[in-house]
Image (cartoon, rainbow, N blue to C red):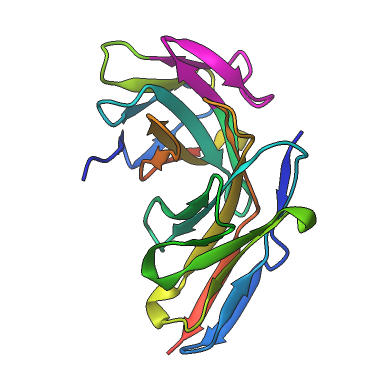
Amino acid sequence: AQSVSQHNHHVILSEAASLELGCNYSYGGTVNLFWYVQYPGQHLQLLLKYFSGDPLVKGIKGFEAEFIKSKFSFNLRKPSVQWSDTAEYFCAVNAGRAGNMLTFGGGTRLMVKP
Amino acid sequence: EPEVTQTPSHQVTQMGQEVILRCVPISNHLYFYWYRQILGQKVEFLVSFYNNEISEKSEIFDDQFSVERPDGSNFTLKIRSTKLEDSAMYFCASRDSPPVAFGSGTRLTVV
């Protein structure tokens, strides 16, 4: 069974600091990879996704993520965070088959201090 | 932009009662899902639904749960006899091609 690990549970940064959130998955086959964000009181929103091709994917709001197949990782990055990035971030994996479920990591709660 | 809508946003029910959580997926989507998130825990897959039948379900989705697409637009999750541990945020999601789009969730509190 596939699993997803996010090792940072809580991250506190000051504005303009750089961000990297770790995500590792365990599944040997073809995967689709996602990062979702959940702002306080709101629903899950897609930040970015990787299906195939260039392993460095760019998403909304200046976020990017790099798929490193050899490390089973899909870390999320942002060069300079803003207070409005305060939210919970979820990495998710889909085993590349139509209709298949998403397996989520435990989430990382990011707080950005103004 | 089309959205997945869920009603109600918050429901409180007594243990042992039946609840129905409602979702209206995006209209041209073909795959429908329910996920739940118990407070402080991971978002967990419950069930996927395609072509008017369940295509996949997790261990959580036992006989007390059922899903239905009663009228071609709504997608419902029924919990027959609620337990305290069913208290969670329930998310509906739908998609045509990946990725899924999520609704804003229904917070279910069982007392």
Q: How many marks?
A: 0
Q: Position of residue B13 (x, y in %)?
A: 44, 32
Q: Nearer the viewer, residue B26 or B11?
A: B26
The front one of A73 and B101 is A73
Residue B43 place in picture, x, y as percent: 58, 44
Q: Quadrant of the C terminus of chain A?
A: bottom left
Q: Does residue B82 appear in this view? A: no
State whether residue A36 is above or below residue B95: below
Q: Is residue A19 visible?
A: yes
Q: Which percent across, then down, holds residue A19?
A: 57, 78
Query: Looking at this view, is A103 or A80 the one in front?
Result: A80
Q: Which residue is rendered at x = 62% and y = 48% of the image?
A: B42
Q: Residue at x 45, y 40 (%)?
A: B99
Residue that protrudes farthest toward the front in the picture: A53
In-image side of A94 versus B19 (left or right):
right
In percent of the image, x 51 and y 23: which residue is there? B48
Q: Position of residue A54 (x, y in %)?
A: 55, 56
Q: Is residue A66 found left or right of B28 in the rendered image?
A: right
- Residue that lies at the very extreme toward the left in this rendered image: B1
Which quadrant is home to the N terminus of chain A? top right
Q: Which residues are magenta?
A: B47-68
Does the magenta run of residues contain B97?
A: no
- Between B41 and A20, which is closer to the camera in this rendering? A20
